[in-house]
Image (cartoon, rainbow, N blue to C red):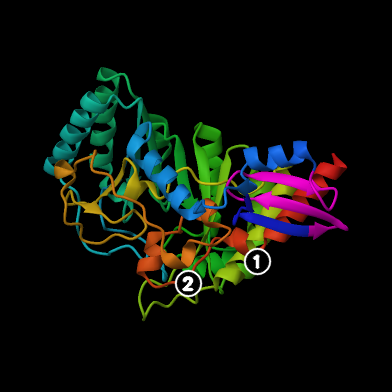
Amino acid sequence: MKESIYNYHFIINDKEYIFNTNNNGLIERTSETFNEEEQRYLIENNFWVADDLDEADELEREINRNIQSGTDNLTLTIELTNQCNFKCIYCSQEKNEKMMTKETADAILQKAKELLAVHKFPSIRIHYFGGEPLMNIPLLLYFDEQFREICAAYKAAYIPTITTNGSLLTDGLLERIGFHTIQLTLEGMEQTHNHLRVSDSFHFQEELDLIERILQKSQSKIIFRMNICKQNKNEAVELHQMILGKFGHERFEISPNIMLKFHENDPVDALSPKEFADTLFQIRLLMDELTGNFTLPMPKPLPCNFLYGNAYAISPDGYCDFCSSYTQNGKTKFTDVDITAKQKLTFRPECRNCKCLPLCLGGCVVQYQLNNEYCIPEKYHMQEIIAHYVAKLQSA
């Protein structure tokens, strides 16, 4: 037997701990040698593996089996328009006048109906996206009405979600649609946010007022996103503390994100992966302080759902984009998609022996395509994460 390549060894308060990223297992080593019972545990939980096992090959096979078996629901990100009433200086979305038509919508609805009929998905998640999706409210309402009818006919749960700048989100829409989640973005404290999120009339305070209305007038959960770059990284913890302190955390999901540089002339002053990891770790500590929830990094059962699962980002003209974060001119109409034709995951050579591979499965393909150096934040703070987790266990 040999030791797993996914084992981390850390000395914390003069004690040795072993953490395996592939099984989420953490053990304390109490002696120089392991007795028979301990050895059995190490083998059963893959801290030790067979001498001839290529763990990256085995992980690759396991993930590809998961890909072929599929996911339990269908997710459609529908870009209702490429138009937007904001002029955010960092935005990567394609800006043009494209507006999805009812004809394109009907084709999408028919394809969704066929997929539900054949594959019997128990739920369908519809994510309304843009541009600013609420610049095409008539089509959003049409989709909502039709998807409710289709899902009722096929006994599938309908889960509507939206990413919006919030400026056009009315109480009437909140009540009528009943969004499961609403993703909003704040890019720092007031002055920084208003600099990065350029709007004529909807600024930091207006967004705080909107959050309060959402919490009062709906049951929607808010996904609070912050795109972190050098201009706002020093305000990240303060902003999270302010938002969650003011509104509570029960109906919030935080989504701090590294701001990408999508092209050479992009004005974004992007963080290095280490700088982003440093900021994110401080946010994790804050969340533990506010919620008491601090977990070990979990292995991923599937890679990106857009590339390998039942998730599709559909452009205003009905084509499948690369993903919702990086819209390009797709070459395949959604109506022509073969949902059974799954891509095969192959790990890049530089990732195969990385201890964090089970946590990221090679990372974001968009990042790689853009030649952005990027590894998951946990890689840079694994010892601090384990030390904090151990301290919590000992104080419990």
Is residue 307 or residue 132 the one in the foreground? 307
Q: Looking at the picture, tell me which residue is in the foreground, 72 or 95.
A: 72
Q: Secondary structure at mark 2?
A: loop
Give x and y (percent) for residue 254: 57, 49
Type of residue at label 1? Asp
The residue singled out by tag 1 in the image is 278
Q: Position of residue 277 (x, y in %)?
A: 61, 64
Q: Which residues are magenta?
A: 11-34
Residue 62 is situated, as x and y percent measured from the top left of the image, at 44, 43
User: In the rendered image, is residue 198 in sight?
Assistant: no
Q: CA distance from mark 2 to mark 1?
A: 16 Å
Q: Nearer the viewer, residue 123 or 180?
A: 123
Give the side of residue 335 with respect to residue 200, left or right.
Answer: left
Q: Residue at x 22, y 31 (%)?
A: 115
**Residue depicted at x 37% and y 56%:** 346
Q: Residue at x 61, y 71 (%)?
A: 275
Report which residue position mark 2 lands on: 373
* Residue 353 shows in this picture: yes
